[in-house]
Image (spheres, rainbow, N blue to C red):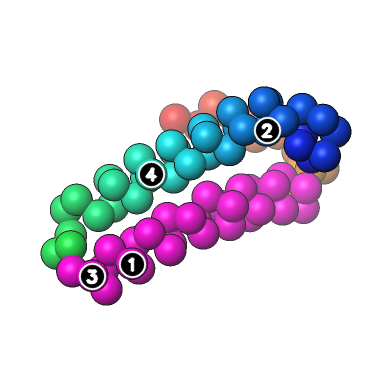
Amino acid sequence: ALAATGHRRAAGACALGWAAGTAEFARARIVPGPRTREEVTTMLVTSVAIPPAATWHRLAGAWRHRNAPAWRETVR
């Protein structure tokens, strides 16, 4: 959306931030593993897919339960 509205630098900065976050997430998942070619490929693909899927589910849950009453006591 930023690039489409002429904010190319902002779009580039956002893309760079997303790529850095994804690389950090992938690294954290790859380092402890066996690091075979198949494992690394799987970790890279799923590291790209997990954040958008998690965001989608978080927003869908918030929307679905938008009218839910607040909890009466603080949850720790």
Name the N-terminal-most of marks 1 and 4.
4
Residue 61 seen by the camera:
no
Residue at point 52% right, 34% down?
A: 16
How far separated are the C-alphas under marks 4 and 2?
A: 18 Å
Assign the magenta stretch its main secondary structure. Answer: helix
Residue 73 drawn at (x, y percent): 58, 28
Amino acid type assigned to the residue bearing label 2 in the image: Ala
Residue interval drawn in magenta: 36-64
Q: Are marks 4 and 3 in contact (CB under 8 Å)?
A: no
Residue 27 drawn at (x, y percent): 29, 47
Left or right of 35 in this view: 18? right
Figure quadrant of the C terminus: top left
Figure quadrant of the N terminus: top right
Name the N-terminal-most of marks 2 and 1.
2
Q: Nearer the viewer, residue 22 or 71?
A: 22
Q: Residue reaching furthest right?
A: 5
How many residues crowd mark 4 within 10 Å: few (<14), some (14–19), many (20+)? some
Q: Nearer the viewer, residue 3 or 42?
A: 3
- The residue that disc 3 covers is 37
- The residue that disc 4 covers is 23
Q: Are marks 4 and 2 in contact (CB under 8 Å)?
A: no
